[in-house]
Image (spheres, rainbow, N blue to C red):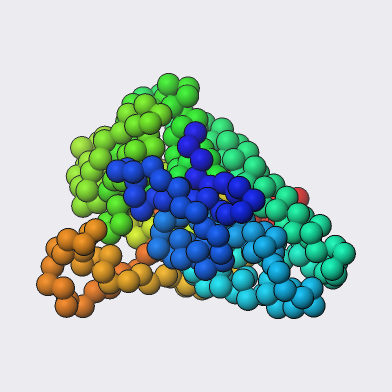
Amino acid sequence: MIKTLFYDNEAVMILDQSQLPDKVEYLRCKTIDDVAEAIKKLKVRGAPLIGVTAAFGLAMAIADYQGEPAELENYFEQARVKLASTRPTAVNLFWALERMEKVFKQESVTEANREQVGERLKQEAIRMYEEDIAINRAMGEYGQELLPEGSQVMTICNAGALATCGYGTALGVIRAAANRGKIDKVWACETRPVLQGARLTVWELMQDKIPVTLISDNMAAYVMQLEQVNAVIAGADRIAANGDTANKIGTYALAVLAAYHRIPFYIAAPLSTLDFKSASGSDIPVEQRPPEEIREYRGLYFTVPEVDVFNPAFDITPHHLITGIITEKGVFKPPYEIAFKKMDQD
Ligand code: MRU
């Protein structure tokens, strides 16, 4: 399994996903600004991985701090705010930052305990990293039970090992099913505009020898009409309390198409993607990305360079289009509001 991220005690090392599949290169992030920039520019992406990357960023910033202990709290807060401003929809980012903040605030920092505080933050980030892989494996086991032998599964974007600390969410389910010989084919939607499907999902599945066929996003309806799809599985950036789900732009279109063709549509995501503060999808902030992502690809313009552009990174799939939400605690079925509440009380 390729490492998406590691910390070498001097820098957060990030697999630069903007270069894939052409180059496998790691980016050395030595400062909080480097980490924030890498997240913003999608060099590291995928909600769970963004969260853990930010956690390592904070651990590194505190370990490197040279100023007065009395100023450390301010410094921590500035770093936290910088990281929190990178990608507004991925709730795992805020979940991870909150978790680090709790560890940081366990006791006040003095000259004597500064190193221990840094070490505690590093250990927390390592714990998150390891937990993420274990969670994805558990999710994979629950999810694969939903797939019959000979399955053809459609997916969008990349919710794989590359979007997490390893194994993946939607692709984790596919991986677990493939390990049992149940996968005949994965239909990977290319995922305009940044092509996470074409560049990342295809690369990741081919590395693992899981059969994958690439389609452009506008072919999904036709492939479903040909009765070539047993299930659609996508990841999530944020799931509201009623089950409405934000995920890569194009996910909603697949959910509508799946409902029309009577194909089960699943979301696979860790519980850290649930956001009970958002009652429904309309409370979820949708990230708007730079227009250049639509106008050009790696410097090549597809259009008149001055054209007006709309570029939301995500859309919201209403809960009534989602057949089940696969998590590390099992598969939730509608009504999600009630299922989530029950889980919270258990
Ligand atoms: O813009 P991206 O590439 O970060 O979008 C990623 C997705 O939409 C994923 O499906 C989601 O973050 C889940 S990743 C396990």
Q: Position of residue 159 (x, y in %)?
A: 44, 47
**Number of numbered discs visible in the structure rendering:** 0
Along the viewing direction, whichever of 217 and 111 lies nearer the viewer: 111
Q: Quadrant of residue 256?
A: bottom left
Along the viewing direction, whichever of 54 and 277 lies nearer the viewer: 54
- Residue placed furthest toward the left: 304
Please name the residue shown 27% across and 56% down the image: 192
**Above or below, comparing residue 173 to residue 12 in the picture:** above
Q: Is residue 192 left or right of residue 231?
A: left
Along the viewing direction, whichever of 145 and 303 lies nearer the viewer: 303
Q: Position of residue 118 (x, y in %)?
A: 74, 59
Q: Is residue 210 left or right of residue 75?
A: left
Q: Is residue 291 left or right of residue 175?
A: left
**Above or below, comparing residue 319 to residue 131 in the picture:** below
Q: Quadrant of residue 96?
A: bottom right
**Above or below, comparing residue 329 to residue 149 in the picture:** below
Q: Is residue 329 left or right of residue 143?
A: right
- Residue placed furthest toward the front: 66
Please name the residue shown 35% across and 60% down the image: 249
Q: Position of residue 35 (x, y in %)?
A: 52, 62
Please name the residue shown 69% across and 67% down the image: 65
Q: Quadrant of residue 341?
A: bottom right
Q: Position of residue 98 (x, y in %)?
A: 68, 65
Along the viewing direction, whichever of 208 and 188 lies nearer the viewer: 208
Q: Is residue 170 visible?
A: no
Please name the residue shown 75% across and 78% down the image: 71
Q: Is residue 293 visible?
A: yes
